[in-house]
Image (cartoon, helix red, strand yellow):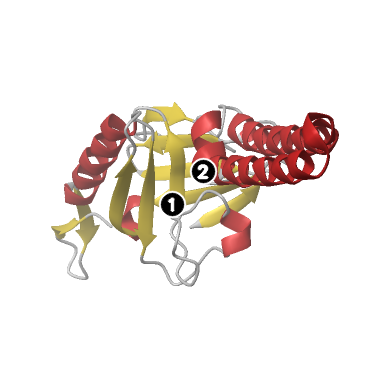
């Protein structure tokens, strides 16, 4: 895996440089904003917390001073909840808009980061396994177990990683729409790439086929 600061002009959206000859772009996408807010930023849990807080504070106000007191206590709590949920949505929107996932015939490229964009190249040769977490609405996360010696830090990747694997981070294309076809495309591309023969030259000068790495 390699990273590249992504301030320079991109010749192709999401890629720091043009793919080499023989490497084709198969798919590009980004997280769905709502799915990212729901799964990575826990929008539903935050909304549930504020709903309970609002009910409790309104109940206290109602018991102490009637409807007027309940409104006086409840309205500021409601405003605070709306502000918090709006901030969470904006964070998810910024992450989704600045992210570009690219699947080529040789690798996965992840251009991530809202404040400090960075690009990670993950060749198929360094992917030991891929896992699809599919949601009912068709969005899903495709996580990759990497086999290389170098690992990407948790904070560097978040939220573009597999949830629940903090000690051994797994880069992930997070919350993408229509994830099932993309996962199938990734599996087929990786299988094709790894099975493709490559000619290497032996000491005696004869050529012998070896499996692609």
Picture residue at 59% right of the left edge, 38% below the top: 16
Left or right of 31, for residue 187: left
Query: In which quarter of the view is residue 193 placed?
Result: top left
Q: Point out residue 148 in the picture as x, y percentages from the top left corner.
A: 41, 67
Q: Which mark is residue 171?
A: none
- The answer to whether the residue labelled 1 contacts the one labelled 2, judged by CB atoms less than 8 Å apart, is yes
Query: In which quarter of the view is residue 186 placed?
Result: top left
Q: Point out residue 199 in the picture as x, y percentages from the top left corner.
A: 20, 53
Picture residue at 74% right of the left edge, 46% below the top: 60
Pointer 1 residue: 122
Position of 1 relative to 4 (above/below)? below
Q: Quadrant of the C terminus?
A: bottom left
Picture residue at 46% right of the left edge, 29% below the top: 29
Of residues 49 and 67, the one drawn nearer to the viewer in this rendering = 67
Left or right of 131, for residue 83: right
Of residues 65 and 154, the one drawn nearer to the viewer in this rendering = 65
Position of 80 relative to 195 (above/below)? above
Pointer 2 residue: 110
Q: Secondary structure at mark 2?
A: strand
């Amino acid at each position: 895996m390699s990273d590249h600061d992504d301030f320079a002009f991109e010749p192709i959206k999401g890629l720091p440089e043009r793919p080499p000859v023989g490497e084709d772009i198969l798919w590009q996408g980004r997280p769905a904003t709502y799915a990212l807010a729901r799964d990575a930023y826990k929008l539903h849990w935050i909304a549930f917390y504020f709903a309970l807080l609002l009910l409790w504070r309104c109940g206290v106000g109602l018991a102490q001073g009637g409807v007027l007191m309940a409104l006086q206590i409840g309205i500021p709590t409601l405003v605070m909840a709306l502000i918090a949920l709006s901030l969470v949505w904006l964070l998810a929107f910024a992450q989704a808009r600045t992210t570009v996932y690219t699947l080529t015939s040789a690798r996965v490229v992840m251009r991530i980061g809202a404040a400090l964009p960075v690009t990670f190249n993950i060749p198929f040769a360094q992917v030991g396994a891929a896992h699809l977490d599919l949601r009912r609405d068709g969005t899903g996360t495709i996580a990759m177990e990497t086999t290389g010696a170098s690992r990407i830090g948790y904070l560097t990747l978040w939220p573009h990683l597999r949830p629940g694997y903090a000690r051994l981070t797994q880069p992930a294309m997070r919350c993408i729409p229509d994830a099932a076809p993309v996962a199938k495309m990734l599996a087929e591309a990786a299988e094709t790439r790894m099975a493709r023969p490559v000619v290497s030259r032996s000491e005696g000068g004869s050529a012998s086929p070896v499996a692609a790495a």
